């Protein structure tokens, strides 16, 4: 594609980077106190600086466009999703012909075609799509070769980037990448080696609300330090869903929570997949039946999918604002020309327009970044199930399916692990045993693994009197 004002074959032309040079080759009243204007910063952006963008959806499209137009040319992008027709109104790097293709790949191709010299490398990561393809036994070889989820990429991959930007809608994935960057930190005699810090710029949007934040892992508040800001999902009361539905959503939730596991229409243990049309069709039909029983109207296929996937309508302009703020922070940090945001900006234009910036503080006993083993207070007669429930329900931990191991009588013992069916079956009886019965002692270390972090978390068991 030839760009207006471009010079055809070559990817540089007179004045191409003038808009950026204005910031980097002269100082001004708002520049960083230590900033010295030079031509080197631009060279660094163009030639050396490596950025990772996680997510190529609403925020990701904006981020890639903004970064590429700001002079960043070495960009990797990871995404877990394929393009759906409903994305096209705001995810502007995609066209109707791209529906069904991986977002990361299409977004990278578009930017590389449109912005000469830009080199975006897609990493494809998506579990649901992979599973669907596997079901149809397609492209097995390709799958193994190409499809990546963030958890499949290791330290060596993440370490190569100067800055990582997240445009994700998943808190678990955010926490995981946060944990990964914390695991890359190097301490010498207790002092953090600043060279091991990879800044994380995190953008998030939900309808008309959004936030942008700058995290220097190990130095400023991390994602888990402020976990309370992500309240657990609000659900409809079970009694309403089970016996007194009033809204179409109640009927869909009934099917999702109760009817699906009971009837297992696609086999035992197959989870309801919001991206599988056959699953949604089934849930939609059952929800209609349920709604008819209670004279409730308004159940549609679209609403069914919305409730199952917990879709919050996306607002394109919110994505644009947040991505612009995030890109500005990437630019400031990469060039050291300006002081970065310190460190949390909220944006809200539900009613008028409101924005506010505050400094989120590090939490002394943050389970991710404090390096202090946390105490777990339980009585010796508490059951293991209570410990698991605590790890899941605690607002500051919010784990998803914690697996617990401990050293008992000199042997490393898995007390409970949910993710592997055979181990789950073998360890399930432990859930109803007391901590004493399991042979756990005061001060015992418990190692807990969970999808919210690549690292195992250490806890110390403190017995309370009964
Ligand atoms: Zn933290």
Image: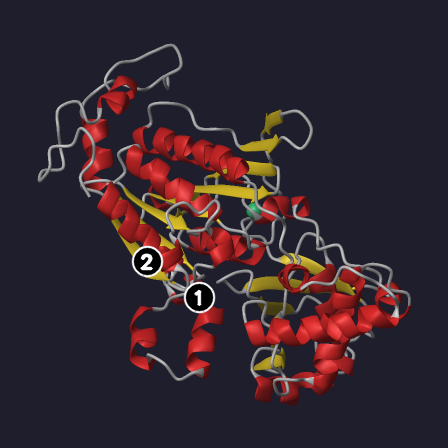
Residue at horizontal 36%, vertical 43%?
64
Residue at horizontal 30%, vertical 75%?
142
* Up/down of 185 relative to 267, above or below: above
Percent from the top left, x then y, of residue 191? 43, 42
Q: Which residue is disc 1 drawn over?
A: 126
The Cα atoms of the two marked residues, 1 and 2, are separated by 12 Å
Percent from the top left, x then y, of residue 368? 55, 53
Percent from the top left, x then y, of residue 15? 17, 22
Direction from residue 125 to residue 458 in the image, left or right: right
Direction from residue 39 to residue 207 in the image, left or right: right
Secondary element at tag 2? helix
Residue 105 circle label: 2
* Up/down of 250 relative to 10, above or below: below
Q: Is residue 149 visible?
A: yes
Most foreground residue, 447 or 312: 312
User: Which quadrant of the rendered structure holds the N terminus?
Assistant: top left
Most foreground residue, 2 or 343: 2
Q: Residues within 10 Å of mark 2 (few under 14, many from 20)?
A: some
For disc 1, does the CB lie below 8 Å from ligand 1? Answer: no
Secondary element at tag 1? loop
């Amino acid at each position: 594609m030839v760009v207006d004002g471009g010079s055809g074959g070559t990817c540089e032309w007179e004045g191409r980077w003038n808009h950026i040079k204005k910031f980097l080759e002269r100082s001004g009243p708002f520049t960083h106190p230590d900033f010295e204007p030079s031509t080197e910063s631009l060279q660094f952006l163009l030639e050396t600086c490596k950025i990772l963008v996680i997510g190529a959806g609403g925020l990701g499209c904006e981020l890639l466009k903004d970064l590429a137009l700001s002079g960043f040319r070495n960009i990797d992008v990871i995404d877990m999703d394929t393009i759906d027709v409903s994305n096209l109104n705001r995810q502007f790097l995609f066209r109707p012909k791209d529906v069904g293709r991986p977002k990361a790949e299409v977004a990278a191709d578009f930017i590389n075609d449109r912005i000469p010299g830009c080199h975006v490398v897609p990493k494809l990561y998506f579990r649901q799509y992979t599973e669907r393809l596997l079901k149809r036994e397609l492209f097995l070889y390709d799958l193994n070769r190409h499809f990546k989820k963030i958890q499949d990429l290791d330290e060596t991959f993440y370490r190569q980037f100067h800055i990582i930007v997240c445009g994700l809608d998943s808190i678990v994935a955010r926490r995981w990448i946060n944990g990964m960057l914390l695991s890359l930190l190097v301490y010498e005699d207790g002092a953090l080696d600043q060279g091991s810090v990879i800044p994380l710029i995190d953008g998030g949007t939900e309808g008309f609300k959004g936030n942008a934040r700058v995290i220097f892992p190990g130095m400023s508040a991390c994602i888990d330090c402020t976990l309370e800001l992500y309240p657990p999902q609000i659900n409809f009361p079970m009694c309403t869903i089970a016996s007194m539905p009033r809204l179409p959503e109640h009927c869909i939730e009934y099917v999702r929570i109760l009817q699906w596991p009971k009837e297992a229409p696609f086999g035992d243990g197959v989870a309801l997949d919001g991206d599988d049309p056959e699953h949604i069709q089934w849930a939609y039909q059952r929800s209609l039946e349920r709604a008819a029983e209670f004279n409730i109207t308004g159940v549609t296929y679209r609403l069914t999918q919305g409730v199952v996937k917990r879709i919050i309508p996306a607002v394109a302009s919110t994505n644009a604002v947040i991505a612009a703020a995030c890109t500005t922070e990437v630019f400031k940090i990469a060039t050291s020309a300006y002081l970065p945001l310190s460190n949390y900006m909220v944006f809200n234009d539900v009613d008028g327009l409101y924005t506010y910036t505050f400094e989120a503080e590090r939490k002394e006993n943050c389970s991710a970044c404090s390096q202090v083993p946390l105490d777990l207070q339980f009585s010796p007669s508490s059951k293991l199930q209570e410990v698991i429930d605590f790890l899941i329900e605690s607002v500051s931990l919010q784990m998803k399916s914690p697996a617990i191991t401990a050293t008992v009588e000199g042997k490393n013992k898995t007390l409970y692990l949910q993710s592997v069916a055979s181990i789950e079956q073998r360890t399930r009886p432990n859930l109803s045993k007391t901590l004493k019965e399991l042979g756990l002692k005061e001060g015992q270390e418990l190692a807990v693994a969970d999808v919210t972090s690549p690292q195992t978390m250490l806890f110390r068991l403190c017995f309370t009197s009964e």
